[in-house]
Image: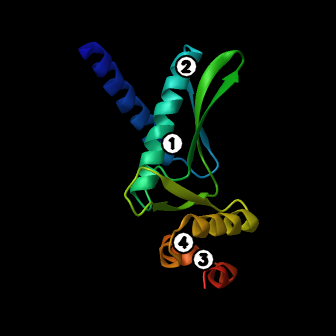
């Protein structure tokens, strides 16, 4: 069991190193990491996504915000790709009042999507003030009307 934990710890350190390197890239660029096996790539991808989600949920702005991690193939070889997006789509997380693990992520994909999510959050029982606070400076006048 000790060897398994050491391996997990080493993988975590490696993916953190890759995420840190990718976070220093200019927006729109991608870090490609060659992998020996698809299974290995999937493990690193899942671990990387978990780390990014934890950072986004914990901190309002971290160096890992805006990173997108996925698997790809080039010439038959599996690669782990970590892309620094031009536009960060994660703008707010609201954790449930009861301090459960559940958090709701608001996206900026389109105005319609965001309005629908605000309406859904209101129907789930989130307070209007909580939503306003989470949206912060990015709130639009239309959304303010919706929250009044």
* Residue with the mark numbered 1: 22
* Residue with the mark numbered 3: 139
Q: How much space separates mark 1 and mark 3, taking CA atoms?
A: 29 Å
Which badge, 1 or 3, comes first in the chain's sequence? 1
Q: Nearer the viewer, residue 100 or 91?
A: 100
Q: Residues within 10 Å of mark 2 (few under 14, many from 20)?
A: some
Where residue 20 sits: x, y (%)?
A: 43, 43
Is mark 3 in CB contact (under 8 Å) with mark 2? Answer: no
* Residue with the mark numbered 4: 135
Relative horizontal placement of residue 88, taking residue 49 as reference (left or right): right
Residue 9: image quadrant is top left
Nearer to us of marks 4 and 2 is 4
Residue 14: image quadrant is top left
Which badge, 1 or 4, comes first in the chain's sequence? 1
Nearer to us of marks 1 and 3 is 3
Q: Which residue occupies 53% across, 68% down?
A: 125
């Amino acid at each position: 069991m000790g060897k398994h934990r050491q391996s997990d710890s080493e993988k975590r350190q490696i993916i953190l190193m890759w995420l840190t390197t990718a976070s220093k890239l200019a927006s729109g660029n991608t870090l490609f990491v060659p992998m020996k096996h698809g299974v290995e790539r999937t493990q690193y991808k899942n671990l990387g996504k978990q780390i990014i989600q934890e950072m986004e949920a914990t901190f309002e702005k971290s160096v890992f915000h805006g990173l997108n991690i996925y698997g790809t193939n080039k010439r038959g070889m599996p690669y782990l790709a970590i892309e620094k997006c031009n536009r960060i789509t994660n703008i707010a997380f609201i954790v449930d009042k009861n301090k459960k693990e559940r958090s709701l992520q608001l996206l900026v994909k389109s105005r319609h999507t965001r309005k629908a999510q605000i309406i859904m959050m209101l129907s789930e029982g989130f307070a209007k003030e909580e939503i306003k606070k989470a949206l912060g400076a990015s709130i639009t006048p239309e959304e303010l009307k919706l929250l009044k």
